[in-house]
Image (cartoon, helix red, strand yellow):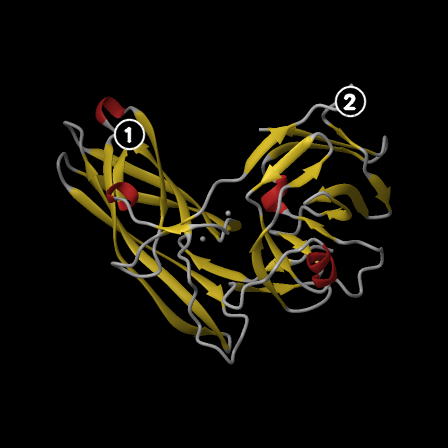
Amino acid sequence: MGRRLVCAAAMALGLTVTAVARAGDLEGRSGPLAWRATDVQQSTVTVDGKRHARHEFALTVKNTGAGPLSLSGYEAAISYFGVPMNEMAGPLQVTVPSGREHRLSFYTLLACPDESRACRFSEGPSWRITLTGRAENNTAFTAPIELMLPTDANVPIVRRERVLVRRVPSGPDPARVPATFKPGVILVPASVNGHDVTLLFDTGSQVCLLSPEVARRLGIVIPADAPSLALIGVGSAGGALVQLPPVRVGDYIVEHLTGAVTSLAGFPFAIDGVLGTNFIEAFRVTIDHRAKELRLEAR
Protein backbone atom coordinates (compact mmCIF):
# COMPACT_ATOMS: atom_id res chain seq x y z
CA MET A 1 0.00 0.00 0.00
CA GLY A 2 2.88 2.32 0.82
CA ARG A 3 4.46 4.75 -1.54
CA ARG A 4 8.23 4.70 -1.31
CA LEU A 5 10.98 6.96 -2.45
CA VAL A 6 13.21 5.31 -5.02
CA CYS A 7 16.76 5.20 -3.69
CA ALA A 8 19.82 3.03 -4.03
CA ALA A 9 22.90 3.25 -1.85
CA ALA A 10 26.24 1.61 -1.33
CA MET A 11 28.09 1.46 2.01
CA ALA A 12 25.45 3.42 3.52
CA LEU A 13 21.93 6.88 2.62
CA GLY A 14 13.27 18.85 7.53
CA LEU A 15 12.29 22.18 4.07
CA THR A 16 13.42 25.41 5.55
CA VAL A 17 16.31 26.79 5.64
CA THR A 18 19.26 28.79 5.64
CA ALA A 19 22.28 27.98 3.65
CA VAL A 20 25.09 28.32 6.14
CA ALA A 21 28.29 26.45 6.83
CA ARG A 22 30.01 26.19 10.19
CA ALA A 23 33.56 25.10 10.84
CA GLY A 24 32.46 22.07 12.84
CA ASP A 25 29.97 20.73 10.32
CA LEU A 26 32.47 18.49 8.56
CA GLU A 27 34.76 17.62 11.45
CA GLY A 28 34.48 16.62 15.06
CA ARG A 29 35.30 14.08 17.78
CA SER A 30 33.41 10.99 18.91
CA GLY A 31 34.70 8.54 21.50
CA PRO A 32 38.38 7.78 20.82
CA LEU A 33 38.15 9.16 17.29
CA ALA A 34 38.59 12.54 15.65
CA TRP A 35 36.93 12.70 12.23
CA ARG A 36 36.60 14.91 9.19
CA ALA A 37 34.62 14.67 5.95
CA THR A 38 36.32 15.68 2.69
CA ASP A 39 36.11 15.22 -1.07
CA VAL A 40 32.36 15.92 -1.13
CA GLN A 41 30.94 15.83 -4.63
CA GLN A 42 27.77 15.22 -6.61
CA SER A 43 27.78 13.58 -10.03
CA THR A 44 25.35 11.84 -12.38
CA VAL A 45 25.46 8.12 -13.08
CA THR A 46 23.16 5.75 -14.95
CA VAL A 47 21.94 2.63 -13.17
CA ASP A 48 19.66 0.13 -14.94
CA GLY A 49 19.00 2.70 -17.64
CA LYS A 50 17.93 5.47 -15.23
CA ARG A 51 19.90 8.52 -14.19
CA HIS A 52 20.83 8.96 -10.54
CA ALA A 53 22.56 11.70 -8.59
CA ARG A 54 25.57 10.20 -6.83
CA HIS A 55 26.61 11.93 -3.60
CA GLU A 56 29.95 10.80 -2.25
CA PHE A 57 32.50 11.80 0.36
CA ALA A 58 35.48 10.50 2.30
CA LEU A 59 35.39 10.08 6.07
CA THR A 60 38.82 10.15 7.69
CA VAL A 61 39.04 8.98 11.32
CA LYS A 62 42.05 9.49 13.58
CA ASN A 63 42.92 7.44 16.64
CA THR A 64 43.33 9.97 19.48
CA GLY A 65 44.05 7.34 22.14
CA ALA A 66 47.38 6.21 23.53
CA GLY A 67 47.26 2.73 22.05
CA PRO A 68 46.03 1.05 18.87
CA LEU A 69 42.34 0.59 18.26
CA SER A 70 40.40 -1.71 15.98
CA LEU A 71 37.32 -0.84 13.94
CA SER A 72 34.94 -3.80 13.70
CA GLY A 73 31.83 -2.43 12.00
CA TYR A 74 29.64 0.47 10.96
CA GLU A 75 25.98 1.38 10.71
CA ALA A 76 24.73 4.25 8.56
CA ALA A 77 21.36 5.99 8.24
CA ILE A 78 20.88 8.48 5.41
CA SER A 79 18.19 11.07 4.79
CA TYR A 80 17.43 13.65 2.10
CA PHE A 81 15.33 16.77 2.73
CA GLY A 82 14.51 15.42 6.18
CA VAL A 83 13.17 12.16 4.70
CA PRO A 84 14.70 8.83 5.86
CA MET A 85 16.07 7.06 2.80
CA ASN A 86 18.20 4.11 3.74
CA GLU A 87 19.97 2.24 6.50
CA MET A 88 22.99 0.05 6.03
CA ALA A 89 25.51 -1.85 8.12
CA GLY A 90 28.66 -3.83 7.50
CA PRO A 91 31.84 -5.23 9.03
CA LEU A 92 35.21 -3.49 9.20
CA GLN A 93 38.52 -5.17 9.93
CA VAL A 94 40.88 -2.26 10.48
CA THR A 95 43.57 -1.57 13.09
CA VAL A 96 44.53 2.08 13.54
CA PRO A 97 47.74 2.82 15.52
CA SER A 98 47.77 5.71 17.99
CA GLY A 99 47.89 9.08 16.21
CA ARG A 100 47.29 7.52 12.79
CA GLU A 101 44.37 7.95 10.41
CA HIS A 102 42.16 5.67 8.35
CA ARG A 103 40.02 6.74 5.40
CA LEU A 104 36.55 5.36 4.60
CA SER A 105 34.65 6.12 1.40
CA PHE A 106 30.87 6.46 1.29
CA TYR A 107 28.38 7.16 -1.46
CA THR A 108 24.65 7.05 -2.01
CA LEU A 109 22.45 7.25 -5.11
CA LEU A 110 19.20 9.14 -5.51
CA ALA A 111 17.01 8.46 -8.55
CA CYS A 112 16.29 11.54 -10.68
CA PRO A 113 12.53 11.94 -11.17
CA ASP A 114 12.64 14.05 -14.34
CA GLU A 115 14.66 12.86 -17.32
CA SER A 116 14.20 16.21 -19.09
CA ARG A 117 16.05 18.23 -16.43
CA ALA A 118 19.57 18.26 -15.10
CA CYS A 119 20.06 15.46 -12.58
CA ARG A 120 21.27 17.52 -9.63
CA PHE A 121 19.80 18.09 -6.22
CA SER A 122 19.92 21.39 -4.36
CA GLU A 123 20.65 19.78 -1.01
CA GLY A 124 23.12 17.20 0.15
CA PRO A 125 22.23 14.16 2.25
CA SER A 126 22.42 13.92 6.02
CA TRP A 127 24.28 10.96 7.48
CA ARG A 128 24.41 9.30 10.88
CA ILE A 129 27.32 6.88 10.91
CA THR A 130 28.09 4.78 13.96
CA LEU A 131 31.51 3.10 14.13
CA THR A 132 32.16 0.29 16.59
CA GLY A 133 35.34 -1.36 17.73
CA ARG A 134 37.77 -1.86 20.60
CA ALA A 135 40.27 0.59 22.02
CA GLU A 136 42.89 0.40 24.78
CA ASN A 137 42.68 -2.58 27.15
CA ASN A 138 40.29 -4.21 24.68
CA THR A 139 37.54 -1.82 25.76
CA ALA A 140 34.53 -1.77 23.40
CA PHE A 141 33.52 1.64 22.06
CA THR A 142 30.78 3.16 19.91
CA ALA A 143 31.45 6.39 18.01
CA PRO A 144 28.35 8.05 16.49
CA ILE A 145 29.05 10.67 13.82
CA GLU A 146 26.34 12.98 12.50
CA LEU A 147 26.96 15.28 9.56
CA MET A 148 25.06 17.31 7.02
CA LEU A 149 26.81 17.45 3.67
CA PRO A 150 26.80 20.17 1.05
CA THR A 151 26.08 19.21 -2.54
CA ASP A 152 29.73 19.76 -3.47
CA ALA A 153 32.96 20.85 -1.82
CA ASN A 154 33.10 24.56 -0.91
CA VAL A 155 29.30 24.94 -1.25
CA PRO A 156 27.30 26.11 1.79
CA ILE A 157 25.35 23.47 3.65
CA VAL A 158 21.57 23.71 3.55
CA ARG A 159 20.51 23.47 7.16
CA ARG A 160 16.99 22.54 8.16
CA GLU A 161 15.26 22.47 11.48
CA ARG A 162 14.67 19.16 13.22
CA VAL A 163 11.17 17.76 13.52
CA LEU A 164 9.58 19.17 16.68
CA VAL A 165 6.83 17.39 18.65
CA ARG A 166 4.62 19.23 21.15
CA ARG A 167 1.83 17.77 23.26
CA VAL A 168 -1.39 19.67 23.89
CA PRO A 169 -3.34 17.58 26.43
CA SER A 170 -7.05 17.50 25.69
CA GLY A 171 -8.35 14.24 27.14
CA PRO A 172 -7.87 11.57 29.79
CA ASP A 173 -5.76 9.33 27.53
CA PRO A 174 -3.33 11.52 25.55
CA ALA A 175 -1.62 8.59 23.81
CA ARG A 176 -4.77 7.20 22.20
CA VAL A 177 -5.56 8.36 18.64
CA PRO A 178 -9.19 8.04 17.44
CA ALA A 179 -8.24 6.04 14.35
CA THR A 180 -10.57 4.12 12.04
CA PHE A 181 -9.52 0.56 11.27
CA LYS A 182 -10.55 -0.80 7.88
CA PRO A 183 -9.37 -4.06 6.24
CA GLY A 184 -5.63 -3.62 5.75
CA VAL A 185 -5.52 0.12 6.50
CA ILE A 186 -5.65 2.59 9.39
CA LEU A 187 -7.22 6.02 8.77
CA VAL A 188 -6.37 8.85 11.14
CA PRO A 189 -8.22 12.15 11.64
CA ALA A 190 -5.78 15.04 11.75
CA SER A 191 -5.55 18.76 11.18
CA VAL A 192 -3.03 20.60 9.04
CA ASN A 193 -2.80 24.34 9.32
CA GLY A 194 -6.12 24.24 11.17
CA HIS A 195 -7.94 22.27 8.44
CA ASP A 196 -9.38 18.82 9.15
CA VAL A 197 -8.00 16.03 6.98
CA THR A 198 -8.11 12.22 6.83
CA LEU A 199 -4.70 10.60 6.54
CA LEU A 200 -3.58 7.03 5.95
CA PHE A 201 -1.22 5.78 8.67
CA ASP A 202 1.39 4.03 6.56
CA THR A 203 4.63 2.61 7.92
CA GLY A 204 5.61 1.69 4.35
CA SER A 205 5.73 5.30 3.12
CA GLN A 206 8.99 7.11 3.83
CA VAL A 207 7.43 10.57 3.63
CA CYS A 208 4.13 12.26 4.42
CA LEU A 209 1.97 12.85 1.36
CA LEU A 210 -0.78 15.29 0.40
CA SER A 211 -2.87 15.35 -2.74
CA PRO A 212 -2.53 18.48 -4.92
CA GLU A 213 -6.17 19.42 -4.22
CA VAL A 214 -5.68 19.23 -0.47
CA ALA A 215 -2.38 21.14 -0.66
CA ARG A 216 -4.17 23.98 -2.44
CA ARG A 217 -6.97 23.95 0.16
CA LEU A 218 -4.38 24.21 2.91
CA GLY A 219 -2.70 27.16 1.23
CA ILE A 220 0.53 25.28 0.48
CA VAL A 221 2.41 26.87 -2.41
CA ILE A 222 4.89 24.72 -4.31
CA PRO A 223 7.92 26.80 -5.37
CA ALA A 224 9.03 26.44 -8.98
CA ASP A 225 12.42 25.14 -7.77
CA ALA A 226 10.99 22.74 -5.16
CA PRO A 227 12.99 19.51 -4.99
CA SER A 228 11.24 16.48 -6.40
CA LEU A 229 11.77 12.83 -5.62
CA ALA A 230 10.69 9.76 -7.54
CA LEU A 231 7.91 7.78 -5.88
CA ILE A 232 6.46 4.37 -6.51
CA GLY A 233 2.98 3.20 -5.58
CA VAL A 234 -0.58 4.20 -6.36
CA GLY A 235 -0.89 7.36 -8.41
CA SER A 236 1.76 9.55 -9.99
CA ALA A 237 5.43 8.67 -10.19
CA GLY A 238 6.88 11.80 -8.58
CA GLY A 239 6.22 14.33 -5.86
CA ALA A 240 7.38 17.87 -5.12
CA LEU A 241 8.74 18.29 -1.60
CA VAL A 242 7.49 21.09 0.63
CA GLN A 243 7.63 21.94 4.29
CA LEU A 244 4.23 21.17 5.80
CA PRO A 245 2.41 23.48 8.17
CA PRO A 246 2.03 22.09 11.71
CA VAL A 247 0.30 18.71 11.68
CA ARG A 248 -1.89 17.78 14.65
CA VAL A 249 -2.76 14.16 15.39
CA GLY A 250 -4.54 13.48 18.65
CA ASP A 251 -2.83 15.47 21.38
CA TYR A 252 0.39 15.97 19.42
CA ILE A 253 1.45 18.80 17.13
CA VAL A 254 4.37 18.03 14.83
CA GLU A 255 6.30 20.84 13.14
CA HIS A 256 8.99 21.04 10.44
CA LEU A 257 7.78 17.94 8.60
CA THR A 258 8.65 17.46 4.96
CA GLY A 259 5.80 16.31 2.73
CA ALA A 260 5.43 15.31 -0.92
CA VAL A 261 2.56 16.68 -2.98
CA THR A 262 1.43 13.95 -5.35
CA SER A 263 -1.67 12.40 -6.84
CA LEU A 264 -3.44 9.82 -4.68
CA ALA A 265 -5.80 8.75 -7.45
CA GLY A 266 -6.75 5.10 -7.35
CA PHE A 267 -6.58 4.61 -3.60
CA PRO A 268 -9.63 2.54 -2.55
CA PHE A 269 -10.64 4.89 0.30
CA ALA A 270 -11.18 8.63 0.39
CA ILE A 271 -8.02 10.10 1.92
CA ASP A 272 -6.39 13.51 1.87
CA GLY A 273 -2.87 12.26 2.39
CA VAL A 274 -0.53 9.89 4.17
CA LEU A 275 1.31 9.92 7.49
CA GLY A 276 4.66 8.41 6.53
CA THR A 277 7.80 7.31 8.30
CA ASN A 278 9.16 10.83 8.81
CA PHE A 279 6.12 11.45 11.07
CA ILE A 280 5.92 7.98 12.61
CA GLU A 281 9.58 7.78 13.67
CA ALA A 282 9.02 10.63 16.15
CA PHE A 283 6.83 8.30 18.24
CA ARG A 284 6.67 4.97 19.98
CA VAL A 285 3.72 3.36 18.23
CA THR A 286 1.35 0.70 19.52
CA ILE A 287 -1.17 -0.84 17.11
CA ASP A 288 -3.78 -3.23 18.50
CA HIS A 289 -5.82 -4.49 15.56
CA ARG A 290 -8.06 -6.64 17.71
CA ALA A 291 -8.97 -3.72 19.97
CA LYS A 292 -8.87 -1.34 16.97
CA GLU A 293 -6.60 0.99 18.88
CA LEU A 294 -3.67 3.20 17.80
CA ARG A 295 -1.44 4.78 20.43
CA LEU A 296 1.33 7.34 19.98
CA GLU A 297 3.89 8.34 22.61
CA ALA A 298 6.48 11.00 21.79
CA ARG A 299 10.07 9.74 22.00
Q: Cβ–Cβ below 8 Å for labels 2 and 1?
A: no
The Cα–Cα distance between marks 2 and 1, rounded to whole angstroms, is: 44 Å
According to the picture, the residue beneath numbered tag 2 turns out to be 171
Residue 253 sits above or below residue 14 on the image: above
Number of other residues with Cα within 10 Å of mark 2, as a class: few under 14, some 14 to 19, many 20 or more: few
Q: Amino acid at mark 1?
A: Gly
Q: Nearer the viewer, residue 250 or 206?
A: 250
Q: Amino acid at mark 2?
A: Gly
Residue 39 position by quadrant: bottom left
Residue 171 sits above or below residue 29 on the image: above
Tell whether 269 sits left or right of 217.
right
Quadrant of image for the N terminus: bottom right
Residue 25 position by quadrant: top left
Tell whether 24 sits left or right of 251.
left
Numbered badge on residue 31:
1
Q: Nearer the viewer, residue 266 or 166?
A: 166
The percent position of residue 96, horizontal first and vertical second, equals: 19, 39
* x 71%, y 65%: residue: 263
The percent position of residue 2, horizontal first and vertical second, equals: 69, 55
The percent position of residue 256, horizontal first and vertical second, equals: 55, 44
Instruction: Name the secondary structure under disc 1.
Output: loop
Q: Foreground mark, 2 or 1? A: 2
Quadrant of image for the C terminus: top right
Tell whether 4 sits left or right of 86.
right
Give the residue furthest to the bottom.
116
* x 45%, y 58%: residue: 9
Of the numbered discs 2 and 1, the one sitting upstream in the chain is 1
